[in-house]
């Protein structure tokens, strides 16, 4: 699609997607073992002589990937911080990472942006409020953030569950919510598959959940 920009100039409108984030590491092989043990998908390992090598991994269910390499970045090894991993179950995700060898912190939450951390998952289960952290073998810092319902404008077009654990969590929330729905109506819902589908789509997109 073409649109008119400044001074009437015709420009093209296109999507712009974050594809890869480069993280600085000291030992490519050690980092490759670390992320392999986490169960992340190895997409590429391209060595070119002794001066260039790039390795790419993608977290389960993620549209974006990470690179670490020889010859791409001059950043200090382990200096990357604030790398966000969004999860739908903040209590299950650390268990999976720990089993792969990642030193994950205890879960904590914040009452709002800029507020101090409080031990444990957000008691109300609010989206975007619960966290855990871990560092890779070089000290690059990752932050897990639980997101169960997207804010308006932050929803995607696909509904993806990165693991059976995430799907199980969604189904448990569905079952509990549908039980409350049937209490309100006072009758068995013959169209429960339609209600389930609407609930999943609404939760993913940030729209109001069905009553």
Image (cartoon, helix red, strand yellow):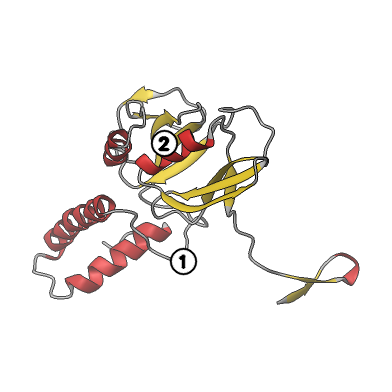
Q: Could you say whether the residue bearing mark 1 is in a helix, strand or loop?
A: loop
Counting the numbered discs, the total is: 2
Image disc number at residue 103 = none
Residue nearest the observer in this picture, 195 or 91: 91
Dot 1 crowding, Cα within 10 Å, few <14, some 14–19, many 20+: few
Dividing the image into 4 quarters, which one contains the N terminus? bottom right
Looking at the image, residue 206 sits to the left or right of residue 8; the answer is left
Rendered residue at 65%/40% (across/down): 50
> Can residue 110 be seen from the camera position used here?
no
Element class at badge 2: helix
Task: Name the mark on residue 157.
Answer: 1
Which residue was labeled with disc 2?
A: 34
Q: Residue at x 59, y 54 (%)?
A: 18
Q: Position of residue 157 (x, y in %)?
A: 46, 66
- Give percent across and percent down for residue 94: 31, 36
**Residue furthest left as drawn:** 187
The residue that appears at 63% across and 65% down in the rendered structure is: 15
Residue 117 in view here: yes
Mark 2 or mark 1: which comes first in sequence?
2
- Contact between marks 2 and 1 (CB within 8 A): the answer is no
Query: Of tags 2 and 1, which is closer to the observer?
Result: 2
Along the horizontal axis of the image, is 54 left or right of 14?
A: left
The residue lying furthest to the front in this view is 49
Label 2, label 1: how many angstroms apart (C-alpha)? Answer: 32 Å
Question: Residue 189, percent across and down?
Answer: 13, 71
Where in the figure is residue 114, as x and y percent of width and height? 52, 28
- Rendered position, 162 above or below 120: below
153 relative position to 192: left or right: right
């Amino acid at each position: 699609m073409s649109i008119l920009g400044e001074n009437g100039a015709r420009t093209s409108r296109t999507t712009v997607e974050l594809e890869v984030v480069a993280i600085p590491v000291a030992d490519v092989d050690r980092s490759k073992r670390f992320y392999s043990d986490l169960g992340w998908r190895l997409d590429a390992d391209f060595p070119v002589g002794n001066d260039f090598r790039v390795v790419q991994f993608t977290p389960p269910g993620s549209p974006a990937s990470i690179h670490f390499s020889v010859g791409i970045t001059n950043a200090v090894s382990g200096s990357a911080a604030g790398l966000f991993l969004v999860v739908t179950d903040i209590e299950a995700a650390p268990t999976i990472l720990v089993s792969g060898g990642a030193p994950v912190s205890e879960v904590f939450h914040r009452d709002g942006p800029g507020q101090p951390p409080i031990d444990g998952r957000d008691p109300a289960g609010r989206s975007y409020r619960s966290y855990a952290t871990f560092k890779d073998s070089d000290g690059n810092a990752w932050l897990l953030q639980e997101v169960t319902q997207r804010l308006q404008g932050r929803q995607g077009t696909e509904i993806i569950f990165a693991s059976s654990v995430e799907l199980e969590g969604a189904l448990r929330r569905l079952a509990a919510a549908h039980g409350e729905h049937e209490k309100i109506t006072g009758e068995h819902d013959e169209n429960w598959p339609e209600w389930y589908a609407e609930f999943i789509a609404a939760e993913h997109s940030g729209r109001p959940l069905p009553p």
